[in-house]
Image (cartoon, rainbow, N blue to C red):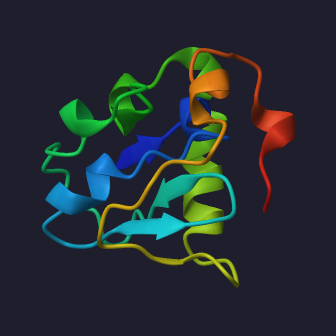
Amino acid sequence: MTHVVTESCIRCKYTDCVDVCPVDCFREGPNMLVIDPDECIDCAVCIPECPVNAIYPEEELPQDQTGFIQINAELSHAEGWTSITKRKPALDDAEDWKDKAGKLAELVR
């Protein structure tokens, strides 16, 4: 099992989680982070660090977020999605997006 970044991260991209990851499994895209399932060791230290509650253990994903298992796996190896190991500022309009649902169409691959 692995951990999965879900829709809540889209257009927010808070990076508090990357500071605590012991194996550097986060990958950064234009407007979201994902977890590389091949690198994640299931330690769960990232979960409480996420200010928008976007990270779940795979087996506890809400039903409407299960598609993010494949999205994380795909994008963690996609061109341009690079390793991120240090916190940086969230997106400029993250506060406007943090509580919105239905953001999948906003994902920039």
**Please, is residue 68 above or below residue 2 in the view?**
above
Can residue 92 be seen from the camera position used here?
Answer: yes
Q: Relative to 6, is 3 above or below?
A: below
Number of callouts in the render? 0
Q: Residue at x 20, y 51 (%)?
A: 42
Q: Quadrant of residue 106?
A: top right
Instruction: Provide residue 86's location: percent of width, then percent of height.
Output: 29, 69
User: Residue 80's x, y, as percent?
Assistant: 68, 82
In the image, residue 16 sits, relative to residue 20, either above or below, namely: above
Q: Residue at x 70, y 84 (%)?
A: 79
Q: Residue furthest front?
A: 92
Classify residue 108 as left or right of residue 94: right
Q: Residue at x 35, y 29 (%)?
A: 51
Q: Is residue 39 left or right of residue 63?
A: left
Q: Is 31 in front, or is 55?
A: 31
From where the camera sits, is residue 1 visible? no
In the displayed structure image, the side of residue 9 where residue 4 appears, left or right: left
- The residue shown at (15%, 57%) is 20
Q: Position of residue 19 (x, y in %)?
A: 21, 60
